[in-house]
Image: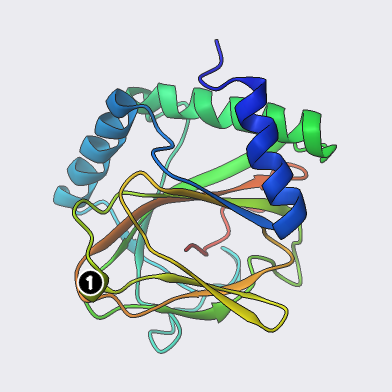
Amino acid sequence: MNIYSDDEWLLWIDSLSEKDYVVIDRFLPNDLYGLVQHFFEEKLSHDDFKKSGIGSVYNNQIIESIRGDFTFWIDKKRDVEIHQFFELIEESKDKLNRYCYLSLSGYEFHLAHYPKGSFYKRHLDQFNNRSNRMITMIVYLNENWKKEDGGELKIYKNDTEILIEPLANRCILFKSALLEHEVLPTNIGRNSLTGWFLYQPSSVGYILGNN
């Protein structure tokens, strides 16, 4: 059973098609948001996050002058406690395929934590040796975020800079191969659930990049 109607998906996808991105507030139902938030906090408290690097799993470098976040990759078979989120991801993939004609056949998602003072410099969600990321999805998990907290997502589109505040339960979808973006320095811990819808499933393992 789908969470959202076709009319809602069409509205969002029309914006995605026209502007190359769309922002959706209060994206997850309250019970699902609470479930994901609890899952995140549990993994963070158990020190399950790993330092993020630049490049593919086979050519990965940790360069703190470019990025300073930590990630935990989620898995549908292992992380059954958030099965409802994976159901929403399947719904999202199906709707993007139906209305955008994208032929998406896979996805990869992780939890992302930016400690105070960290950032991610301007980049594109594609790599020279792998270019099958089509749509980026970010769901923010930052309760009571305020402007002075920082950590905004800055999108570069033509000659325009678009600033997205990382508000709790705000979702952003954007075209992975088109929009360069960066995470501005954060003054508090900054959390999200981030992933990519793929033209085909990855055959080389997770790519270590996030937003």
- Where residue 75 sits: x, y (%)? 46, 36
- Residue 29 higher or lower than 167, as above or below: above
Q: Inspect the image, locate mark 1, and give the three-letter code of the amino acid beneath it.
A: Asp
Please identify the quarter of the rendering in which residue 92 is found. top right
Residue 195 in view in this figure: yes
36 to 67, vertically: above or below:
above
Q: Considering depth in this image, is 150 or 77 the residue closer to the camera?
A: 150
User: What element does badge 1 sit on?
Assistant: helix
In the picture of the structure, the residue carrying the numbered disc 1 is: 149
Q: Is residue 16 above or below residue 64?
A: above
Q: Residues within 10 Å of mark 1 (few under 14, many from 20)?
A: some
> Which color scheme is applied?
rainbow
For the residue pair 161 and 52, the one nearer the viewer reads as 161
Q: Position of residue 155 (x, y in %)?
A: 57, 72
| Residue 154 falls left or right of residue 34 | right
- On screen, residue 71 versus residue 189, left or right, reads right
Number of numbered callouts drawn: 1
Q: Is residue 202 visible?
A: no
Residue depicted at x 39% and y 70% = 152
Towards the viewer: 147 or 103: 147
As drawn, the residue found furthest toward the bottom would be: 65
Q: Residue at x 76, y 72 (%)?
A: 128
Residue 208 at x, y percent in the picture: 52, 63
Which residue is drawn at the image coordinates 69% and 41% (left, top)? 13
| Residue 28 location, quadrant | top left
Residue at (66% x, 36% y) in the render: 11
Quadrant location of the N terminus in the rendered image: top right
Residue 157 in the image: state x and y as whole percent. 68, 74
Q: Residue furthest top?
A: 1
